Amino acid sequence: MPKIFKKRSKKIGLPPGTLVHIGEKKTEKVEISFINYDEAQYQEREIIKINKCFPFKDKPAVTWININGIHDVEIMGKIGEYVGLHPLLLEDIMNTDQRPKIEDFGDYIFIILKMLYYNEKKKEIEIEQVSLILGLNFVISFQEREGDVFNSIRERIRRGKGKIRKSGADYLAYTLIDAIVDSYFLILERTGEKIEKMEEKLVSNPTPITLQGIHNLKRDLIFLRKSVWPLREVISGLERTESSLIEESTGIYLRDVYNHSIQVIDTIETFRDMISGMLDIYLSSISNKMNEVMKVLTIIATIFIPLTFIAGIYGMNFVYIPELQLRWGYFAALFIMAVIGIIMLIYFRRKKWL
Amino acid sequence: MPKIFKKRSKKIGLPPGTLVHIGEKKTEKVEISFINYDEAQYQEREIIKINKCFPFKDKPAVTWININGIHDVEIMGKIGEYVGLHPLLLEDIMNTDQRPKIEDFGDYIFIILKMLYYNEKKKEIEIEQVSLILGLNFVISFQEREGDVFNSIRERIRRGKGKIRKSGADYLAYTLIDAIVDSYFLILERTGEKIEKMEEKLVSNPTPITLQGIHNLKRDLIFLRKSVWPLREVISGLERTESSLIEESTGIYLRDVYNHSIQVIDTIETFRDMISGMLDIYLSSISNKMNEVMKVLTIIATIFIPLTFIAGIYGMNFVYIPELQLRWGYFAALFIMAVIGIIMLIYFRRKKWL
Amino acid sequence: MPKIFKKRSKKIGLPPGTLVHIGEKKTEKVEISFINYDEAQYQEREIIKINKCFPFKDKPAVTWININGIHDVEIMGKIGEYVGLHPLLLEDIMNTDQRPKIEDFGDYIFIILKMLYYNEKKKEIEIEQVSLILGLNFVISFQEREGDVFNSIRERIRRGKGKIRKSGADYLAYTLIDAIVDSYFLILERTGEKIEKMEEKLVSNPTPITLQGIHNLKRDLIFLRKSVWPLREVISGLERTESSLIEESTGIYLRDVYNHSIQVIDTIETFRDMISGMLDIYLSSISNKMNEVMKVLTIIATIFIPLTFIAGIYGMNFVYIPELQLRWGYFAALFIMAVIGIIMLIYFRRKKWL
Amino acid sequence: MPKIFKKRSKKIGLPPGTLVHIGEKKTEKVEISFINYDEAQYQEREIIKINKCFPFKDKPAVTWININGIHDVEIMGKIGEYVGLHPLLLEDIMNTDQRPKIEDFGDYIFIILKMLYYNEKKKEIEIEQVSLILGLNFVISFQEREGDVFNSIRERIRRGKGKIRKSGADYLAYTLIDAIVDSYFLILERTGEKIEKMEEKLVSNPTPITLQGIHNLKRDLIFLRKSVWPLREVISGLERTESSLIEESTGIYLRDVYNHSIQVIDTIETFRDMISGMLDIYLSSISNKMNEVMKVLTIIATIFIPLTFIAGIYGMNFVYIPELQLRWGYFAALFIMAVIGIIMLIYFRRKKWL
Amino acid sequence: MPKIFKKRSKKIGLPPGTLVHIGEKKTEKVEISFINYDEAQYQEREIIKINKCFPFKDKPAVTWININGIHDVEIMGKIGEYVGLHPLLLEDIMNTDQRPKIEDFGDYIFIILKMLYYNEKKKEIEIEQVSLILGLNFVISFQEREGDVFNSIRERIRRGKGKIRKSGADYLAYTLIDAIVDSYFLILERTGEKIEKMEEKLVSNPTPITLQGIHNLKRDLIFLRKSVWPLREVISGLERTESSLIEESTGIYLRDVYNHSIQVIDTIETFRDMISGMLDIYLSSISNKMNEVMKVLTIIATIFIPLTFIAGIYGMNFVYIPELQLRWGYFAALFIMAVIGIIMLIYFRRKKWL
């Protein structure tokens, strides 16, 4: 599981707008990909120096610059300068501990989102911050490291499939957000499967490991919730914005992704409910088990302790114990013991302990 | 119980508006029924090719097309094309994992609802997605499989009973929604009966199976809640809409079905409260039982352990144990043991353990 | 306790507005009482045929028709026809499973409330649905059976006590609502007494019966809450209505009854809080008891098991056990046992188990 | 602790506005104190007949009439008549079970608040209802019994300290409300001290008495909450009112007392949180104790039961038990027993039970 | 941990606006630092008499007066007089038990915040109240004692780094608030580390000390929450204010610090969720342990009690016990005992107790 909380202490005391990378550095080299397209043409390049892709602001075609790696202060500064970004915005991009949010700066809209991966090796959820800047005819996206979620969008642009080549930058931004929200469904599917497995185990054989599993699921969901909850506001803010950057025809697509985000939140809440139910079941099954253990102990002890007492009595060395002299005393004693034992058993059966 | 969460992963990466059926295929063949009526006449047909029922948009009478089975991409496409539906809408119809919602597209209103059945064989609740498109003089309804909930409406149209033949398409849409909400009451009745049975068992003889039953009920309610909660917004949205498709006189009927939906939600919350109370009772009854078991063990052990100790003392083989030489030593020992036992019993009675 | 949920299944499939009585039939014959008054005169009659009381709509004096028994479809139909009531409204009156609500139909206001009785015989709360129709100069009230809550109001009208004879139909409606809300305070008083008794028992001697009692109280409160919660909206809706049927001077009285309803809700929430606290106390007192039982067992066993072991050693039949040959061996053994026992007791005292 | 709920049953059936005293009669004689002041002069009298203080409405100076004891229907009636109070208002004053509220009657504002005392003798919180009527140049305050909370205000008026003599009746009303809210802080201080003591006990030596103490604290807080929660609305209502009775300059003082009331509510919520945490700690410390008891029992039993068994074997009277004939058999047996015991101890140490 | 609640009792009965210091006196001498700057020049002084820094209101440059120590009534009075502060405001500054709040007095804005320190020696969180008065060209800040949080801001002013020297008093106020909010992140980091350590302990070896630790963490979070929750409103109030004291360009900085405050609140809620999960884990791990202890006891007792009984039987002294005479009786008895023991072990293995 990723850390719930990232160290921000190195930022404390610095003036606002100072560019400091907060978070793990997830990629060594910063990679910049440049895509420029309109309905007629399409152009794609890998860029090393960020200046190479300027000036895209003046071109009529849509430009999408995707930057993998956000720790390079120099590149960030250059982009900020060219596009005219507010220093606080750049600071936010580099601080990976941001809450998802949307801010409308007039000339451009700034969006921070969280992308979620399931790391198959470590068996845990990984989180990455994705920032989007939506301008009149460009989108700049910042990722912490190279990912494959946006590949299908690149492919769609290349092949001119769907509406994307015919639409503006706002539709591109929507497509990116949609891809991110879709990635949540994968995480939910996996979490759902885990919950189902856990439920089966809970019924068949609950162990402390099951408990640990439930606890981990719960932490995962707390974590998911923290990342996804603000998403709703973000998308709803984008939908309701009066910015001229969003065309009216994109509204219905935003409403669609908004519905998806609500569905994600709904499912997380449902999962939380289910897990809290599982904890109750776990606790009661432990109680049940202890009860069963106690019953076995009690039955054995309650039957044999009195019998042992009787045996003890006739093991005493008093000079005169009349029963001991009887020829059939031993068998009488055994018989009495058997009777007592049987009475006990009947009593336990009545109590439904057997 | 149906799955809380359906696999959407096959959709990820596809452009929005791509028609993919998500969910179980519940019927093999797609069945299309066509009903056309006004106050004077009535016409009903089973249709195989969807084109056969065009053009209904131009007719003045009300047309109701009901489609059982939503996995056929071709039929969906044709309907979409003829009526002029938005691609996202068709996508939503085919994705059975939608949250109930309402969307006003101007020319038509699009509604997604969940219908609930109680499967008597599997003893579990089944869910089906129903989508409605309400146009000026037509309603198109999509079901996942053939169901009998709408039969009584068909019958009412045939016989011209009630207001239905005299009213427009909006009243028909209301009637369909009303039938769906009514189906929830059946589920609630059944759940209520289960809860009552469970409560009786809880009092008479709580077992781990009871616990499992409570857990299943809880899951059912989490599930019901997820399906029904958004319903309120949907119907309230329909009631408040300023669309010209809804006549004013239909408003009071919508308010009525709105009240029903609130009642459904209220009852679900009440059931949840009751079930959470049942879990507490279960846990305390287990604790009580364990307490009782403990008491029996303690009483037996506490009485006989000291007595056995006394017997053990006089079983020792020391050369000189004066008591052993006494003629009445044995009876004195028995008497002392009896006294100790009786004191113990009095002590337990005082402690209210007996 | 009344059923949380009533069977509505017989209504499913019928067109909206169909008159079907849902609920228990609580009275055999329908009784109709007719009161007509203004400041100057007063007239009261028992009526058998509903037509006999027509036409009251045209009279200037205030008319109050109270109908005990709501299962007679014919009477309902006639009233509906004469006053011009909406079919859905009549359906709601006859369906006793309604949620309290208010609806303004322009010419008349329709109110559904729940009246609560404490049945002394069955020791449980009983519920009855009361519907009110407030017109320009008339009020029609529907009760499920004859009750005495409205008697004091009849008395006040007869004697001309208070403002009632000088005021219009809206004041009469307020008086009826006030009487219903007042009946809740009786239920709360009784519930409060039960809670106090339960608390005393909880401290003095908690048993599984106490638990059952707490559980029943909890159910009662869930039930009360369901009935009373919507009341606030209803009265607030009546207060805020812009209908000309409510005179301005009645506003302050409605605000007063609104405050009462909030107080009822407040008290129910407080009771719920108290009961949830009681359950915690119950559970911990069981744990405490079990702890005490365990301590007794442990003290006895821990003292005597080692001593019995020592006795066992000297009960062995080895040919050569030197201690056994000692003249004072027996007394030495007893002394050692006593020392061990005393050390144990000191240990337990230190642990505060004694 | 005061009763959560007061008997209102004697009021049921009476017409609204009937004056009936509900609650305990806390003082025998009704005491009326009359204070009249402006910046220049000051006058204070004890009055026996209420008429003696009329007519104060026409005087330009501020008049404050404080009435201790609210059960005298006659006095209430006379005041009501002279000032022109609404009958419902008088009813509310005499019914001590009111929820704190504010009502603006145009000519005067009516406020109901709860004053809280800590009764040092009974070690419990006591509650008193205080009603205020704020007119153009007068304030009438009703208390259930003589109290000393308003004394400091009287003193301030006498000495002309602070702003009070220079300000109008609205400032006087504010001062009274402020004094009441200040009295809550005393209760909170005392509750806070109790909680701290309880926490120390919880750590050092939790007993069932601690549990009872926690439970009582919880009840106290439920009770406090019920009294204080509506206060916020009341003061906020007073602050936001557009009544000409409140001068603009008083606004900032009302905001101040509003902030205090929020602080009271905040603190109550914090206390509730802390107490719920304490209950958890209590329960786990009981579990811990039981666990410890169990360990002692298990260690003793597990060590000595097998050893006693061995001793039992060599206590058997079979004719041929070869070990018994060995010269060193006894010592060998003791050695084996010691070895078994030591192995057991090592095992327990590994399990961290020792 | 600091006290949740401070004694206010010494204030009760005093007229509003009376200056009384409530809280611990955290510094002996009051220290006043005076900074005056604009883009061109910079001036810094330590002041002993507060009058020395007057008149700063008329100067065009920005003045920042920081006062460490708030218990000196005289200094407070002088500042209040010179700047024209409302008496209630001064009272609030000196009462360190205030809730964070913002108030707009027109000429100046008054802000109360809480600063949090982690005291490394006492291992607990310490709280300090910071009050800010923002005027047209001045900021006055009040601290309870000397702290180093504002040092970096002084340094920035000295060096002219960042925007601060070029901006007005509102930007200075923002910088101070930002520094305070940043200090929360330090506390959260430390709390986060504690939670992680606690979780590890919980898994490896839960003890009552762990429980105490969880409880302390919970108290810390209750405390943090109380201090931080109102912060959101304060900053949002500052952002939304229409006061001319806040320049438009500062708005985006305020939004930034608003986002930070939401993040702080989010993290606190997440921590609370995690800790409540930890308590559940703790409780179940205790239950698990007890279960394990019980199993050991039960296995030992259940195996040896019957065997000891058999040994007891053959230890009886009856004259005629046929088995005792058999030559191989002893070995037969041992064999039977072994068989019984093995059957028991198989039984436990089946029950998965071994």
Image: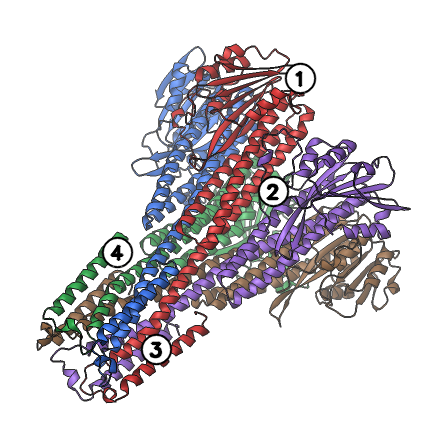
Chain colours: A green, B blue, C red, D purple, E brown
**Residue D341 percent coordinates (x, y):** 30, 78
Q: Single out the mark in the foreground, 3 or 2.
A: 3
- Please indicate whether residue C343 sits to the left or right of residue A102 in the image: left
As shown in the figure, which amino acid type bears the numbered disc 1?
Glu
As shown in the figure, which amino acid type bears the numbered disc 4?
Phe
Q: Residue at x 47, y 47 (%)?
A: A268
* Above/below status of A307 relative to D168: below
Quadrant showing the N terminus of chain E? bottom right
Q: Residue at x 31, y 69 (%)?
A: B340
Q: Single out the mark in the foreground, 2 or 4.
A: 4
As shown in the figure, which amino acid type bears the numbered disc 3?
Ile
**Which one is earlier in the sequence, the residue at label 2 or at label 4?**
2
**Can you tell which quarter of the image residue B13 is in?**
top left
Please name the residue that numbered disc 4 is placed on: A348
* Above/below status of E127 relative to C221: below
Q: Compute the Cα span from label 3 to label 2.
A: 66 Å
**Residue A98 percent coordinates (x, y):** 59, 54
Q: Secondary structure at mark 4?
A: helix
Q: Residues within 10 Å of mark 1 (few under 14, many from 20)?
A: some
Q: Secondary structure at mark 3?
A: helix
As shown in the figure, which amino acid type bears the numbered disc 2?
Gly
Q: Compute the Cα span from label 4 to label 1.
A: 78 Å
Q: Which mark is residue D346?
A: 3
Quadrant showing the C terminus of chain E? bottom left
Please name the residue that numbered disc 1 is placed on: C39
Q: Compute the Cα span from label 2 to label 4.
A: 67 Å
Q: Chain of mark 1?
A: C
Tell whether label 1 touches label 4 (CB within 8 Å): no
